[in-house]
Amino acid sequence: MHEVVTLEGWSSPHVEAVTRTRFATGGSMRMQPDGCWDVVIFRNADTTTVLRTGLTTAAVTHDYAAGDEILAIAFKPSSFMPLMPGELMRDQGVVLPLIGKDRFRLGADVLEIPTFDTVDSFVRKLVRNCIIEDNRVVASIVSGHPMAMSERTLQRHFLKTTGVTYKTFTQIERAQKALALLQQGRPAADVAFALGYADQPHMIRSVKAIMGVTPGQAARS
């Protein structure tokens, strides 16, 4: 069993979502691609770990114990960390060094480890110190209204910032939508048609490869 709380009432041009998960028992969970990169704080009775992850293209299994807590800050794909650009961070995770019990080092900066209640001030400091920036070109692509420039330039911006091509990004988005519809009980054939997959087997292969589950498993979850 675990408790999941999503931060409400705060929005940011850089952050997609903030989620805190507390585990009452041990087990494992599937962390699925969502088109974002993250700063994740893992806490248990003995240790705190600060992890910077890149955008992922396949599901990852995380084992947890009773009493563990995860604070995940999911950054929008158009947000960019020059120190760890997306093209180097795809499907990667870097543990950031701790400074004492409540701080960590990120490049030349020493930052307080955020809590669920201090995420907003943490993100403001990242922006103020130019640790994260916004790539307006990528934001325009994701919004469906790309800036007027060559296709090659658009793709170069997208790959450098996110670590994936726009085609791969849209495949992840479509697999997310398919999984959500399947979990609502929609028939697999209807979902495949609604989302423009070539056929149902194509959807099954894509959802399995990206999200780590078959449509049947998704429908039962």
Image (spheres, rainbow, N blue to C red):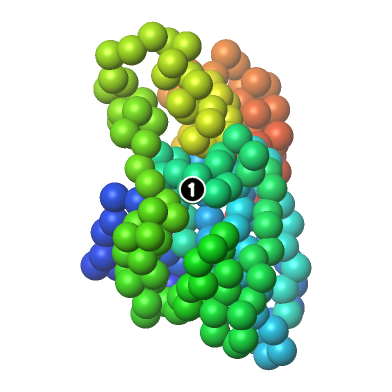
Q: Quadrant of residue 85?
A: top right
On the image, the x and y values in percent for residue 218 come to: 61, 46
Which residue is disc 1 drawn over? 81
Q: Give the total of numbered labels.
A: 1
Q: Residue at x 62, y 86 (%)?
A: 100
User: Left or right of 121: which side holds 205?
Assistant: right
Crowding at mark 1 (Cα within 10 Å: few <14, some 14-19, many 20+): some
Relative to 19, is 58 above or below? above
Q: Residue at x 50, y 21 (%)?
A: 156
Q: Position of residue 61 (x, y in %)?
A: 73, 57
Give the residue displayed 35% in from the left and 28% down from the top.
137
Question: In which image quadrant can residue 48 be found?
Answer: bottom right
Where is the C terminus found, in terms of image quarters?
A: bottom right
Q: Is residue 220 visible?
A: yes
Residue 1 appears anywhere in the view: no
Q: Position of residue 52 (x, y in %)?
A: 60, 58
Q: Is residue 145 left or right of residue 18?
A: left
Residue farthest front in this picture: 108
Q: Is residue 2 above or below residue 37?
A: below
Residue found 63% across the figure and 44% down from its top: 89
The residue type indicated by label 1 comes to Met
Give 166 or 210, whichever is nearer the viewer. 166
Vertical order, 176 against 145 (above or below):
below
Residue 153 in the image: state x and y as whole percent.
Answer: 44, 16
Q: Is residue 53 left or right of residue 80?
A: right
* Closer to the camera in the image, 207 or 60: 60
